[in-house]
Image: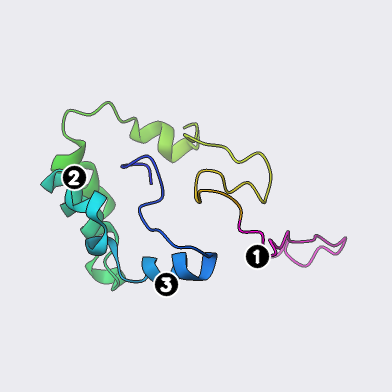
Amino acid sequence: ELLVGACPFSGETPTELLSNSLNGVDSVQKFQDLDSDVQDCVHRLSEIAAFKRIALKDLRDHQFFAGQDFNWSDLALGNMQPPHRPSSPTDVQKYMPGPDPSFEYAVPETDSTPWDELF
């Protein structure tokens, strides 16, 4: 999404969108139009087997990031600002052409128990 400015996968419903995303980035025309360094970086990051994925050191040195103004320290410290901050838990405007009226968006409820404090 960050590379092409929109969700690279399409679907009439959230289920169809998810199903299409399972076909992988190679099935997306927008991805095929990207530079080969970008394609290589995305492939290496999305490797299914974790032990085959690109290591952080190699990612920092990857040709895609060469010459780019990317602040790895800000990323590590959590100081980077997201390109889009949803206005609510159901804000899907950047991900779909419009909300699907037949889909019930579940907003997680919180309880007053401290069950997650020890996670």
* Residue at (51% x, 51% y) in the render: 96
Residue stretch in magenta: 100-119
- Give SS at disc 3: helix
* Residue at (66% x, 39% y) in the render: 87
- Give the mark, 1 or 3, whose residue is nearer the N terminus: 3
- Give SS at disc 1: loop
Q: Is residue 1 magenta?
A: no
- Could you classify mark 3 by the number of other residues whose Cα lies within 10 Å: few (under 14), some (14-19), or many (20 or more)? some
Identify residue for label 3: 19
Task: Tell me the CA gap for discs 1 and 2.
Answer: 32 Å
- Could you classify mark 1 by the number of other residues whose Cα lies within 10 Å: few (under 14), some (14-19), or many (20 or more)? few
Residue 67 location, x and y as percent? Answer: 17, 28
Q: Residue furthest right?
A: 112
Residue 71 location, x and y as percent? Answer: 34, 30
Q: Where 79 falls versus 2 (above or below)?
A: above
Identify residue for label 1: 103
Identify residue for label 2: 34
* Magenta region, main secondary structure: loop
> Three-letter amino acid code at disc 3?
Ser
Residue 18 location, x and y as percent? Answer: 45, 68
- State the residue in front, 85 or 115: 85
Q: Is residue 102 magenta?
A: yes
Frontmost of labels 1 and 3 is 1
Frontmost of labels 1 and 2 is 1
Q: Is residue 111 left or right of residue 38?
A: right
- Give the mark, 1 or 2, whose residue is nearer the N terminus: 2
> Three-letter amino acid code at disc 2?
Leu
Q: Which mark is residue 9?
A: none
